[in-house]
Image (tube, rainbow, N blue to C red):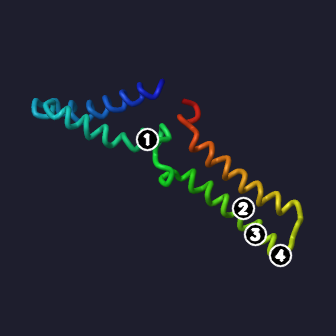
Amino acid sequence: MNLQTSIATGILDEVFKRALKPATHQEVQRAPQVAYEAAKELAPVLVNMTNNEPWYQSRMTWGAIAAILGGLSTMASLVAAGDWSMELWFAGLSSVGGGIGTVYGRWVAKKPLGQ
């Protein structure tokens, strides 16, 4: 099922659930308002599904930033201690590289995996 079909199905389900369940004339007349309310509730979900939220609201971006900062602090402490063991440097560089790759992938992605 593509994204447009999912959106339309979600909105129609909410409209039917809210407006047509009582099946009174007054409630049926409220259908446009109910559709608007349902769309407003679905908007954050759809923004997340389509990777359109601002970068500062992305938990993935913040996790990647934390990984980058953790790797940089590891490398800074290694420099301060004068430790040049490859195993420890590899851990710090891996964290920084993984964080940068994650941020790049998140910002470049146009749709979620599997869509």
Q: Earlier in the sequence, mark 1 or mark 2?
A: 1
Which kind of residue does numbered mark 2 sit on? Gly
Q: Which residue in the structure is indicated by mark 1?
A: 47
Q: Nearer the viewer, mark 4 or mark 1?
A: 4
Query: Does 64 sit left or right of 2 as displayed?
Result: right
Q: Which SS class for mark 1?
A: helix
Is the C-beta separation of discs 4 and 1 under 8 Å? no
For the residue carrying disc 1, how many other residues have a C-alpha within 10 Å: few (<14), some (14-19), or many (20+)? Answer: few
Q: Which residue in the structure is indicated by mark 2?
A: 71
Is the C-beta separation of discs 4 and 3 under 8 Å? no
Q: Real-space Cα distance between discs 4 and 1?
A: 46 Å
Vertical comparison of 67 with 15: above or below: below
Toward the bottom, the furthest residue is 81
User: Residue 9, how many percent across, how many down?
Assistant: 37, 27
Which part of the image, by quadrant, shows the C terminus?
Answer: top right
Residue depicted at 33% across the width and 43% down the height: 41
Which kind of residue does numbered mark 3 sit on? Ala
For the residue carrying disc 4, how many other residues have a C-alpha within 10 Å: few (<14), some (14-19), or many (20+)? Answer: few
Q: Which residue in the structure is indicated by mark 4?
A: 81
Q: Which mark is residue 76?
A: 3
